[in-house]
Image: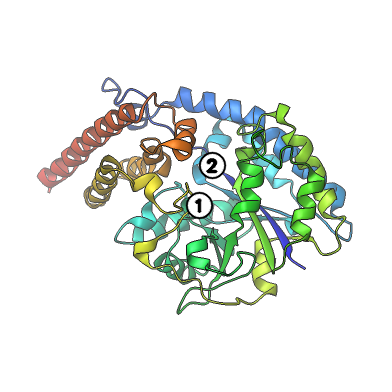
Amino acid sequence: MPLVNLVFEVHQPIRLRKYGVDRKSKNMFERYFSDSFNKEVFDRVANKCYYPATNTLLDIVNDLKNTRKPLKVAFSITGLWIEQAMKWHPDLIELFKQFPKKHVEFISETYYHSLASLFDDMGEWEDQVKEHRALITSLFNQKPKTITNTELIYNNVIARHAEKLGYKGIFTEGVERILGWRSPNYLYRPPNGNIKILLRNRRLTDDIGYRFSSRWWSEWPLTAEKYAAWLSACDGQVINLFMDYETFGEHHEEGSGIFWFLKALPYKINEYENLTFSLPREVIEKNDAVGVFDVFELSTISWADMEMDVSAWLGNDVQLAFHNELKRLGELVKRAKDKELLRIWRLLQTSDHLHNICTKWWGDGDVHQYFSYFDHPHQGFATIADVLFDFKEIVMDSIGRKQKKN
């Protein structure tokens, strides 16, 4: 009788200025980031997704909360999304606060949705996780017990550091080359660790998140009745359905029927006696790990693309060069001891910047182009290079001025 975890990733990056540095601006944020463009994107997605999806889920949670089979949902909300919501749509934060405490879970992640877990020193990753945890605790009065790293990036080292920070569970992708013959619908643990690993069911999640509107798909149109029947036929401890929140209304337009599907799904799932909604924290409290999920550091996995590795962000030479430059800049930024420079450096770490300059072909390339606001990856190359070189000069100048004072 598998439990059903319904988990949503809620994230919007703070995007760079499309055409590079505004050298006329002395404000560091405005020099590199486009507030007007970010507001435009956030406004659009708020109206298409965040308001209707959150209101829909909240209505169903309240409708079922006193029944034998209540709806429970979990959210992994980045610090950057919260910042933008508080700035432009604070009523969205209030909507999330309205979920009954026993029916919602807020999951930890990196505040900046960064690739800091791929740095040689995990100290920066831990600092960003702590910053995010403090924000979630203060905003929603709930201290997270589970964590998801950026884009479900995972290896044994990340699991070890998550456990060190006190987390009881961590999400990642149910990658077949790691699982082998085993099912993603069970809890696992890392070698020499006790933190429980919750694996995203890729096929069942992507049936909604990726294939829902695809008329080429043999199962189109996907109905709530059909999908609930698929879930009911599953074995295991838990079915983790982990998807972008923007699935509803943004990736799949309202006209596709995605909101009708969302409204009907909890009720259709509840028609099956062997299915019950749960929260990640409840799953890890009630179930033991059944085996080891062993991911060496050089075989790091994620939920991205066909490879399910880190090639979405580090798959070409320019991405690698920019990533390595960001790592080197970290040493200089921390020497400068300037809070504004530290903030800008962390904003530049957001994984979306490198995702936007991926040069893959075919289906994965289409996904990257869909998310990117650059006309071409090479435009993104030029923009990021301009920003990093300019930022490095400012950091070096800051260090130089402080050395002269001393």
Is 31 placed above or below 105 here? above
The spot of residue 125 in percent (x, y) is 39, 57
- Residue closest to the eye, 105 or 7: 7
Q: Nearer the viewer, residue 381 or 63?
A: 381
Residue 123 position by quadrant: bottom left
Of the residues under marks 1 and 2, which one precedes in the sequence?
A: 2
Q: Which mark is residue 303?
A: 1
How far apart, in angstroms, are the residues tagged by discs 1 and 2?
15 Å
Choose between 208 and 148: the one closer to the eye: 208
Amino acid found under the numbered disc labelled 2: His
Q: Quadrant of residue 26?
A: top left
- The answer to whether residue 196 of the structure is visible from this angle is yes
Residue nearest the observer in this picture, 228 or 132: 228
Mark 2 lies on residue = 11
Q: Secondary structure at mark 1?
A: loop
Q: Position of residue 281 (x, y in %)?
A: 65, 65
For the point 55% across and 60% down, which residue is it? 174
Q: Residue furthest top?
A: 24
Amino acid found under the numbered disc labelled 1: Trp
Report whether 90 appears left or right of 387: right
Q: Looking at the rendering, which quadrant does residue 127 occupy?
A: bottom left
In the figure, is residue 50 to the left or right of 299? right
Give the structural element (helix, strand or loop) at label 2: loop
Q: Which mark is residue 81?
A: none
Total marks drawn? 2
In this view of the protein, can residue 61 be seen by the observer?
A: no
Indicate the quadrant containing the N terminus: top left, top right, bottom left or bottom right. Answer: bottom right
Residue 257 location in percent, x, y?
75, 32
Q: Is residue 296 left or right of residue 371?
A: left
Q: Residues within 10 Å of mark 2 (few under 14, many from 20)?
A: some
Q: How is the image coloured?
A: rainbow
